Amino acid sequence: MNHALHRTGVAGDPASPIHRLDPRAKIVGLAGITLVGVSTPLGAWPAFVACALALAAIAALARVGPAVVWSRVRVILPLVIFVAAFVPFVRGGPTVALGPLSLSEQGVQTFALVTAKAAIGAWSAVLLSATTSFPDILHGLERLRVPRLLTVIAAFMYRYVFVIADEARRMRTALAARAYRPRHLGQVGALGRMITALFLRSYERGERVYLAMLARGYAGTMPRLAVLVFRRADTAFLAALALTLLPLRVLAA
Amino acid sequence: MSCAIDAHDLRFRYPNGVVGLDGVDLHVTHGERVAVLGPNGAGKTTLMLHLNGLLTGEGSLEVAGLRPGDRELRAAVGLVFQDPDDQLFMPTVGEDVAFGPLNLDVPREHVHERVTAALTAVRMEHVVDRAPHQLSLGQRRRVSIATVLAMRPRLLVLDEPSANLDPRARRELLEVLDAIDRTMLVVTHDLPFAAQLCERAVVLSAGRIVADGPCTEILGDERLLADHDLELPAGFDLSRVADPLSL
């Protein structure tokens, strides 16, 4: 078991005040930080700094170290930055020289802005997933009236993505064991057949899972055992975030 | 008192024409543990799906005094599927064990009790908050059994419970099952496992029951086993099965 899927899950101190918050409070709070970060215009740097400080404070309270945050952010961030990295070269307007390259001033600013926004978004998402187990996030979303269909799909995906990834790895090993090393396009056919087989297997598994659900009295709704309780600490958490971030965001507008 | 299972001339044909059951007669009384032996494709799984009303064929079938179609049938018969990844579909073990009782509208405070009791019965109470993919196959199989025990079924039906288990996981499973006091139908082609757990065995072949009797007698009949593509492992000594867990 050594694939990227295992770089997920709860980290830090599970008994920390942040970990013990109601999932709903964390979802709303961290999505709020992301929204403030994303909607803030260029030049309103106090709002960005406030978002970053709020995230740093949450990480510190939850004892989620920079190493954990970095190892997870690293998965999401490069994609965004890769796209944004071209902007300084294609934007018009006044330019600055950087050695042999000439960069558009506006482009550099856009790049910085996009990077800052992406970093705040990714950081929020990483903190949410590091302090809340995936089932709890789903439960929270359900209580926040996210359509049941979406949360049920996400729940099944979480349950079976590991099973399917394992199956895929076994199939790849089996291909490699028979000396399959695609060197040109004509040889990728085997991969296509592997994906087909994987799809059919998953489809058949779906049928069996449905039988197993029926056998235990499934009648169309997914029952929930745990109950979420919104405590004073949750209200305090949201109030603290709102009081620090909203004024800055409003002033920046 | 009704029989645990009372099937008479049960027939079932799959939509593609394959005959699943070809006139099954089976009578099981309460408290019995019966091994259903047979090669692949003999109709073992088809029979199992009938007991819970997931498939309905022709002929008469009564399980724990209920007929197919009765809503209580799903609760009265606990099916444990062969692949625990099919059986365990919820994000955590605890939620999965609670799934059945919650569907039966058991009040929440009792559901917690049932979850704990069921997981304790299979010695898995320490994994209640874990995700199924974090458990070993043996552990997942025992949790699968807990998911139906929590529904307090009158009849427990297990499909190939010992498949793919290493010797230690197999032994732990045997101990757990032996301690469960319930009418049990064990569908398997692991003959030593059947010998160790069940006192009675029936042989299912090509959709019919072709032999029915004490487990040691059936397993001692080499001719019968060979006729139906079954065999004991080489060197297996049936006489040592008198005390089921002494092996």
Image (cartoon, coloured by chain):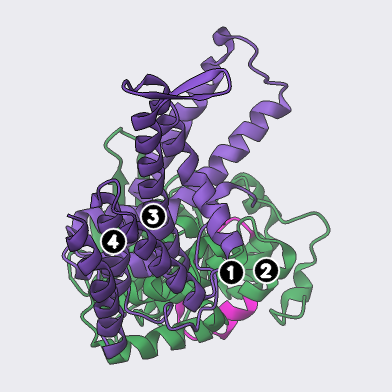
Colour green maps to chain? B
Indicate the position of residue B130 as horizontal and vertical percent values. Answer: 50, 71
| Residue B238 inside the magenta-drawn segment | no
Q: What color was chain A assigned in the picture?
A: purple
- In which chain is the residue bearing label 1? B
Residue B139's disc number: 1
- B109 vs B220, left or right, is left
Residue A31's disc number: 4
Please check whether the numbered discs 1 and 3 fall on a single chain. no
Please check whether the numbered discs 3 and 4 fall on a single chain. yes
Which amino acid, by three-letter code, is at mark 1? Answer: Gln
| Residue B183 inside the magenta-drawn segment | yes
Residue A120's disc number: 3
| Quarter holding residue B7 | bottom left
Which amino acid, by three-letter code, is at mark 3? Answer: Ile
Which circle, 4 or 2, is nearer the viewer?
4
The crowd level at tag 1 (other Cα within 10 Å; few <14, some 14-19, many 20+) is: many
* Residue hosting label 2: B169
Q: Which residues are magenta?
A: B174-190
> For the residues marked 4 and 2, what is the alpha-carbon distance in whole angstroms?
45 Å
- In which chain is the residue bearing label 3? A
- In which chain is the residue bearing label 2? B
The crowd level at tag 2 (other Cα within 10 Å; few <14, some 14-19, many 20+) is: some
> For the residues marked 3 and 2, what is the alpha-carbon distance in whole angstroms?
47 Å
